[in-house]
Amino acid sequence: MTRATSFPLHKIKAVICEGVHKSAADLLTNAGYTVEHLPSALNPDELLDAAQDAHLLGIRSRTTVDPNFFTQAPRLLAIGCFCIGADQVDLSAAASNGVAVFNAPFSNTRSVAEMTIAQIIALNRRLCDRSSQLHAGKWDKSAVGSHEVRGKTLGVIGYGRIGSQVSILAEAMGMRVLYFDVVKCLPIGNAQQVDPLEDLLARADAVSLHVPATSQTEQMLGANQLARMKPGALLINNSRGAVVNLDALAHAIRSGHIAGAALDVFPVEPKSADQPFSCPLSGLPNVILTPHIGGSTEQAQEAIADEVATKLIKLTNNGSTTTALNVPEVELPILHQDNQRILHYHQNVPGVLSKLHQIIADRGVNISAEYLQSDPHHGYVILDVERSQAQAIADASRNIPETIRVRTLW
């Protein structure tokens, strides 16, 4: 289905759900758009009611956008995921309907790293157990099982932006850092890369996971890997819920082989505060369970809001798709005032570009600038042409059978 969208700024409708930081709504409003800022997640029916006629949609992790939504939201240009991941959006369906999807994979890096360090200290000092005892009226001032982190070895699994920041902070406190990654990484500070993973598990006093959700990382720490960990070690998982086998971890803690754990992510997480939560680790000693709040600081949420909203504005006003997760990435300059920009998004099959060029040649139009990027399934062509013929070219390009969306900017 071919879609044509070109609107005055005040007619661009943006719907932002799930209580995204108000900075996002402010930026979109200041850009001239009409913004609806909703406080909670929406189920599929509610999402259609609220955003069926939207040009821009902003969500966090609890709102699911399925293929059905795209078929019923013909104006939609882009989705902004105001969070790290985008698993809640059907990226393939979005691309097939000419909808770019953006996220903010790195804006909460510092917040997650700081919480990881806090968990390492809390587990070594058994702070949560001591706090719970005191709340229950029990005064236990014993130093048994309480340790400094200085001089201990931290094993970081996944040495990306978060893992490397954890490494820096840990070294600043006097810890030794080993890290494992599937690719060769340049160490920061005095950290040392080790291979295989079992070497890290055997040497680390605390192991912290910072890996993506892939088929290779699913259940990467099960009973066999936990058994290889140093007796009395700690485990921290602030990455993805499916990375650790929770039943095996609970058994390792009960047996005393693992001295404690902190988890912020789980294989199945409630969609709202009204839904119950259960976990094999609930009630175990020296176990910290938090409700996926690693990136939930005011600073991180504001940074995420600014990053994603800026990407949405840039796509809408300029056509740039840089950092989009599902469509070809193109970084575009500011449009010259004498030109009009035609954005042509299409199925990536041979001959589309030739058809576009023939349309332009038939009208004797000079192209001021042309940009093209493609992936195996879709192509994105941007043409800056003289204003007098731009609308005729755009209208004709909609008749190309492979066209998915045509948009004009001026």
Image (spheres, helix red, strand yellow):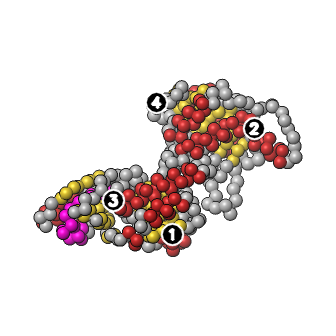
Q: Which residue is mark 2?
A: 126
Q: Which residue is mark 3?
A: 318
Q: Secondary structure at mark 3?
A: helix
Residue at left offset 22%, top offset 63%: 338
Measured from the top left, where is residue 49 in percent x and y? 51, 74
Please name the amino acid that badge 1 sits on. Glu
Residue at screen point 63% across, 27% down? 174
Dots 3 and 1: beta carbons under 8 Å? no
| Inter-mark Cα distance, 2 to 3 | 53 Å
Sequence order check, earlier mark of 4 and 3: 4
Q: Looking at the image, is mark 2 or mark 3 nearer the viewer?
A: 3
40 relative position to 121: left or right: left
Q: Is residue 86 magenta?
A: no
Residue that label 1 marks? 36
Disc 3 crowd, CA 10 A, few/some/many (<14, 14-19, 20+): some
Circle 4 sits on which residue?
186
Magenta stretch: give its range.
378-395
Question: Local crowd at mark 4 within 10 Å, few (<14), some, or many (≥20)?
Answer: few
Q: Is residue 384 magenta?
A: yes
